[in-house]
Image (spheres, helix red, strand yellow):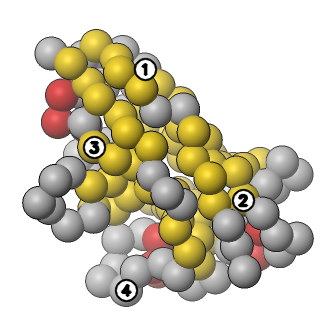
């Protein structure tokens, strides 16, 4: 069982930066692939970024490549999403996710098992 708690969302102007954090419970955190997804009202939750258990491999949606960076600290049981050069279209609720199957956190149709409660990111123009 893994519990996930996101933080770091907020309101920022276009071109600004935010860093999201996701703290995970459980002694087996290091065995889980992790990812970030986002959702806007009336739309499906979309893949944003994923990272394997060691942090050695990262994956990004085309819309955020070059602007967002996912990372993890297996000592602190935390993953991060550094978001730079934010755009109004990045406005969404951002969710952290975990699964032992890497394919579920890198944009495949199968969804991760564990989810956080979400954190709102709003980018003003």
Q: What element carries label 4?
A: loop
- Left or right for 110, reference 34: left
Location of the C terminus by quadrant is: top left
Which residue, given by chain and number where applicable, does mark 2 sit on?
A: 24
Residue 65 position within the rendered picture, expressed as x and y whole percent measured from the top left? 34, 43
Q: Quadrant of residue 14?
A: top left
Residue 88 position within the rendered picture, expressed as x and y whole percent measured from the top left? 18, 28
Instruction: Name the N-terminal-most of marks 3 and 4.
Output: 3
Residue for point 88% across, 71% down? 27
Q: Is mark 1 on a helix, strand or loop?
A: loop
- Left or right for 88, reference 35: left
Which residue, given by chain and number where applicable, does mark 4 sit on?
A: 110
Crowding at mark 4 (Cα within 10 Å: few <14, some 14-19, many 20+): few
Of discs 2 and 1, which sits in the foreground? 2
Instruction: Name the N-terminal-most of marks 3 and 1.
Output: 1
Spatial CA distance of label 4 from label 2 is 21 Å
């Amino acid at each position: 069982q893994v519990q996930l708690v996101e933080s770091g969302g907020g309101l920022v102007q276009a071109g600004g930066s935010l860093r999201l954090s996701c703290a995970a419970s459980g002694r087996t955190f290091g065995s889980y692939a992790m990812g970030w997804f986002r959702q806007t009202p009336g739309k499906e939750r979309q893949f944003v970024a994923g990272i394997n258990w060691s942090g050695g491999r990262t994956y990004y949606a085309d819309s955020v490549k070059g602007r967002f960076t996912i990372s993890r600290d297996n000592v602190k049981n935390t993953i991060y999403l550094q978001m730079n050069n934010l755009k109004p279209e990045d406005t969404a609720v951002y969710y952290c996710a975990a699964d032992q199957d890497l394919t579920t956190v890198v944009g495949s149709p199968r969804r991760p098992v564990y989810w956080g409660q979400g954190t709102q990111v709003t980018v003003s123009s």
